[in-house]
Amino acid sequence: MTERLASTSLVASRWNRLINELMTGRLIPVIGPELLRVNLGEGPVDFYQYLTRTIAERADITLSDDPATHTLANLVYLAYQQQRGDQQDICYELSAVLRERMWPTPEPLLKLAQVCKQKLFLATTPDNLMAQAIREANPDQSTAVEVRAFSPDVVLQDLDLSFSNDTPGPTVVYKLFGGEEQLPNFALTEEDTLRWVNALQTQNRRPANLLDHLRERSLALLGCSFENWLARFFLCSAKGESITKIGTHGAQGVIADRHTVADEPIRPFLVRNHTLLYQDGDGVGFIDELHRRWQEQHATPTPTPTAVQPDPAAPPPDEMPNDAVFISYANEDVAAAERIESRLRDKGLPVWRDANKLEGGELYDLTIKEKIQSCLVFIPVLSQNTTTLRKRYFRQEWNLAMQEASSFPATHKFIQPVIVEDGQDTRGLLPDEFKNRHVTQALAGEVSDRFVTDVKKTIIRYINSS
């Protein structure tokens, strides 16, 4: 009876409960690589299969024709076998590829971030895509995201002792198997993963605050596809003696991925340990259904066409500063800056940008300073042209904007970077103030309606709160 319960399709009441528990932090999502489907121009691709092929090409490693073998673990083996390097070489190459551009946000992660309004996400991969998705899913509020990672070989990064889903503080993305920031200390092979999970139980190396937090809650393993033995070992390590109990918050665990759904021997273990198995698809399918049901719950009624209501949040036109938005850009990106300006002005937003680009001079410096101090949103246009090592005036504009940002409340998104090129490395020379913010992708300056609306809401919200 209990085994059948774990393998049947989820009923509506169960979906409602899952949504509630994910929103309130009683059920903690664990993000696996299967959720990382990125659109690189020809439809979504498996991100880590793509990374594996990219690194193999750079390292002159020959892969088989079977995409299922395009894994980092197999790449490490082939590097040894074909004498094309070792595991640390692969780690360094992986880190380089992850950092060389702003990758598109995987849609499954964005949907999950929209549903889960909680403060903790666990990741099993070294990238920062989950943090990126959280920022993108919260454009109307300044959601601080902090990335931490666990490795048995570096200084311990744990949750703060005061961490809670109900108290102020940043949302934490905790990488369980190391992160790109800890180069080369992240797990690539099964042996690495086993060592990492074992270290979670080692008294002097374990993240005690994190594990204490998890033991009171349950886990949603989404797109992880752990092998049978690893799934058992992982759950036991994360939950400790509470593995056979539903968390004190009343949540029940869930697993959704490609591998576990076909793993018959693990089902009795999951039943005994209060963990549901999603039978109607993989982790991506689970999130799609979760998101669809969440949207139905939070749908707003369509207004009657004959009753057009004025926007109650909109201030009178004369309350909007004359230069509400400042656009900063390199000379070479003038066309993209003009498109951004045009889109903002079409929505009634006053914009200032230096149309003549007469850089330098005391009067010019004073004008720029006054415009930045009077604006409510600063948009730096990022491209390959802003990664130059040469002295450029736009960096003075950036510095002034960062000083001005400190005067605003943390909830106001004063700096809103826009990247206008595809596939370019714009992160290497960026100030941390920019790196820690969500960067909007807008090829050639074609910003979306959503971005324009979010900028307008940011300004209106600040004016109405003053």
Image: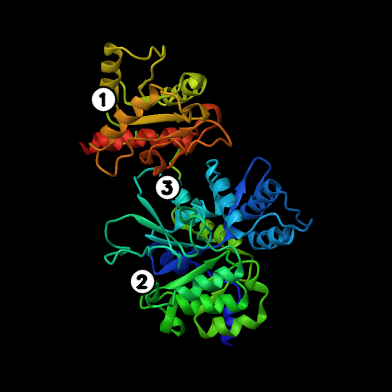
Give the labeled residue for mark 3. 135
- The location of residue 188, given as percent across then percent down, is 59, 62
Q: Amino acid at mark 2?
A: His
- The location of residue 308, given as percent across then percent down, is 40, 34
The furthest residue to the right: 65
Q: Amino acid at mark 3?
A: Arg
- The location of residue 59, given as percent across then percent down, is 68, 49
Pick the front one: 217 or 385: 385
The furthest residue to the left: 466
Q: Amino acid at mark 1?
A: Ser
Distance from disc 3 to disc 2, alpha carbons, whole Å, reads: 23 Å
Q: Is residue 431 left or right of residue 123?
A: left
Using the image, determine if residue 35 lies above or below residue 376: below
Seen at 65% across and 60% down, the residue is 76
Distance from disc 1 to disc 2, alpha carbons, whole Å, reads: 44 Å
Indicate the quadrant containing the N terminus: top left, top right, bottom left or bottom right. bottom right
Pick the front one: 274 or 393: 393
Give the labeled residue for mark 2. 213
Give the labeled residue for mark 1. 374
Indicate the quadrant containing the C terminus: top left, top right, bottom left or bottom right. top left
Seen at 25% across and 21% down, the residue is 370
- The location of residue 291, given as percent across then percent down, is 52, 57
- Quadrant of residue 353 within the rendered picture: top left
Dot 1 and dot 3 residues touching (CB under 8 Å): no
